[in-house]
Amino acid sequence: MTRIQQGTPEYRRVTLALFLGALAVYASLYVTQPILPLLSDHFGISPAHASLSVSVATMSLALSQVLVGPLADSLGRKPIMIFAMLGAGVIGVAAAFAPTFGLFLVLRFLHGLVMAGLPATAMAYLAEEIDVRHLGAAMGLYIAGNSVGGLSGRIIAGTVADFWGWRAAVGSIGVLSLACALWFTRTLPPSRHFRAQPLQPRRLVGSLLHALSDPLLRSLYLIAFLTMGSFVALYNYVSYHLMAPPYRLSAALVGWIFVLYLAGTFSSAWMGRLSDRYGRAPMLALSLAIQLAGAAVSLAGGLLVKIAGIAVFTFGFFGAHSIASGWVGQRAVQDKGAASALYLFTYYLGSSIAGTAAGLCWMRFGWPGVVGFIGCLLTAALGMAALARRQDSR
């Protein structure tokens, strides 16, 4: 059967459904990021401790990727993604009523476990169903859903929290996730090129080992760890930075800082198309360099210049993620689900580890310490991108 072509009604249904799926999942995953200072105040905990509300969800999501990707190779793509979105909505609403921070963390851990079904499966679905000539653009639109989800979740959470508190903020994102899940269920076409494979533990291990055997894929996994780690490190602590002197912004205004995700919405689709035209390796290196430059500009004292630097940083990150994730889907001829799972495992592992580690830099050195930590991660990512280019030419 012919794969889905750009410009067809089916292509629009696929990209819209996955866009909304990504929106729901990433709004849920990072709902606590703009309200971390409110959690610190409400529960009497440190910034690094409060950041665990992000880190435990991304850590459980990372661990779940390893199982969900191969599971989707056996049970199918669409059912796994539907379960992920419905689970995200239900647990999100429940988390809003958690009486203690400990129980809240348990629910956030479960949140990450169920949400893994969509990101672990979506890239494999696109790689199977979309014509390879249009895969970069389709992947870019899916990644754009990531940025819009992150944007809307943070803006809604920050604004709602300023008026009705953090519980209302978390609950509102849970309701949004349920609405997107219903639309997704009705809209996404079933897989036509999926071929079910038996779910066997030995085969699961073999799929993961095979996905680890390619040096180029290993480089892309490490790039995912480093870039996502730097991204979450910046956005975890920018709220503390901007709510403190001399800026003293409110939670609602800090939430609107995340409108900068629109730069990622544009860059993910645009850089995805450019990578189809000019090659993945050079465009990946360019995206990482842009991200590093944006982090440096964010050190400026003026608020507008600082915001511009964060916008440039965001533009570079989503461009790099779009290119690297599309590259994994194209490179993994076999066991695409396992390769996608490993990519996202390292991606969210970077979020969990760096997102908490950067808190120690914040507590000791303030914003310059966070940016210095980010600079180290991105310098290493640029080195891995150069290695990936050489491996791709062999």
Image: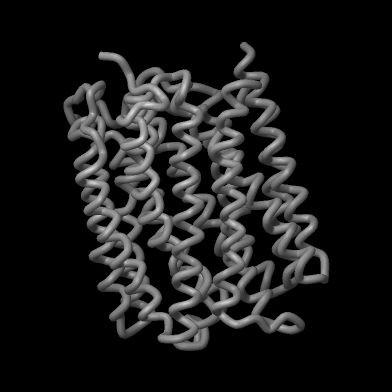
Q: Residue at x 74, y 48 (%)?
A: 292
Taking 345 as reference, is 304 left or right?
right
Relative vertical location of residue 317 with respect to residue 125 in this rendering, above or below: below
Locate residue 63, reporting x and y percent: 37, 49
Q: Position of residue 344 (x, y in %)?
A: 44, 42
Image position of 32 with respect to 20: above or below: below
Nearer-the-camera pick, 312 or 220: 312
The front one of 384 and 143 is 143
Residue sticking out furthest to the right: 301
Q: Residue at x 79, y 63 (%)?
A: 305
Query: Quick one: which residue is furthest to the top in this view?
Result: 394
**Residue in the picture at 41% in, 27% down:** 7
User: Which of the two residues, 372 or 22, is positioned nearer the viewer here?
Assistant: 22
- Split into 4 quadrants, where in the image is the C terminus? top right
Residue 335 visible somewhere in the drawing: no
Would you place residue 42 above or below residue 34 in this image?
Answer: below
Q: Quadrant of residue 106?
A: bottom left
Residue 380 in the image, given as x and y percentages of width and height: 69, 41
Q: Where does residue 80 sit, x and y in percent of width and height?
A: 23, 43
Q: Quadrant of residue 206?
A: top left
User: Which color scheme does this rendered protein use?
Assistant: one colour
Image-based side of 349 in relation to 68, left or right: right
Badge count = 0
The vertical placement of 373 against 207, above or below, is below
| Quadrant (top left/top right/bottom left/bottom right) for the N terminus | top left
Q: Is residue 345 visible?
A: yes
What residue is at 68 percent from the left and 70 percent from the top? 362
Taking 103 as reference, is 163 left or right? right
